[in-house]
Image (tube, rainbow, N blue to C red):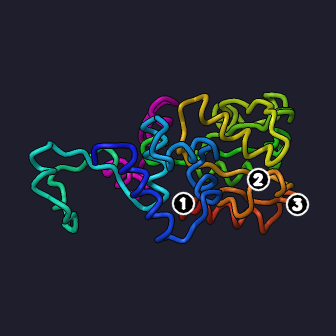
Amino acid sequence: MKSLAQIADLLRERLKTMSITQRELCARACVARRTLTGVLSGQADYKVTTLLAVLDRLGCELVILPKAAAAGLGDDTSFEPTPPVVKTRVQAAIDKLHKGDAMTYDGTINARFLACVVAEPLLFVDGKALLDARLQAVLADFPLVEVVAFAGTQLPPDEAIPEPLRRRIIGSTLPVKHTTEVRFHEILTYLDALRLVGRAWIALDADATLYPRHSPGLLVCAGGFGEAEEVKLREMLATKQF
């Protein structure tokens, strides 16, 4: 492909094939509606990370080839790549996780690097929720998940949160001017500011109206973080359903 218009044609065709709306794709890829409209128009410029996020949620990958190799493919791209002889860093990290010894890495920096490699989600919560023993237990079992507090919510005093969890609270979202789906836009703005567009996320929230319908990363906790919510969050983290 040699133009933004050709990329846009492919993306629009995938949308039709998968029978999902642009609104749903925005929620899945964690991009703003205006950004996605520009991508699908074939005219607006955009960041590579935005394209990668959209492609991923449409079941596609970006492959870069030398011109000679691309010319040899022609219009027929129905080929199966051969398995790599040498494992990539990503595959090696995933293999370590499967063996259960990922935490042999020492220090916070290595743990965060591994979290990025295997695309662990960010967890967005009301600051006070971090006092909940159930939530603390879940986060203890998933030590690579980092936590962000929602704007306008108060974090507990440091001494009220276990030290390992306290180190994983990496910040707070900022208030946004949107009047609808406010928390959703808070999350998108936070990810964009940190150049984490496309990063998976989970939000624990009591109010589903602050998000688009069918947001895959939303876990509604209308009655608090109870047993059912704990089971669901563990399932989402274990199976990467977000």
Q: What number is the disc on residue 115?
A: none
The three-letter amino acid code for the residue at tag 3 is Ala
- Inspect this view and state whether residue 192 appears: yes
- Inspect this view and state whether residue 144 appears: no
Residue 89 is drawn in which quadrant?
top left
Q: Which residue is mark 1?
A: 240
Circle 1: element type: loop
The magenta stretch spans residue 105: yes
Which quarter of the image is occupied by the C terminus? bottom right
Q: Which residue is mark 3?
A: 222
Main structural element of the magenta stretch: helix, strand or loop? helix
Image x and y of residue 60, in percent:
38, 58
Q: Which residue is mark 2?
A: 211
The three-letter amino acid code for the residue at tag 2 is Tyr
Q: CA distance from mark 1 to mark 3?
A: 23 Å
Mark 2 or mark 3, earlier in chain: 2
The magenta stretch spans residue 12: no
Q: Residue at x 70, y 67 (%)?
A: 231
Foreground of the two, 46 or 155: 46
Q: CA distance from mark 1 to mark 2?
A: 20 Å
Mark 1 or mark 2, earlier in chain: 2
Q: Residues within 10 Å of mark 1 (few under 14, many from 20)?
A: few
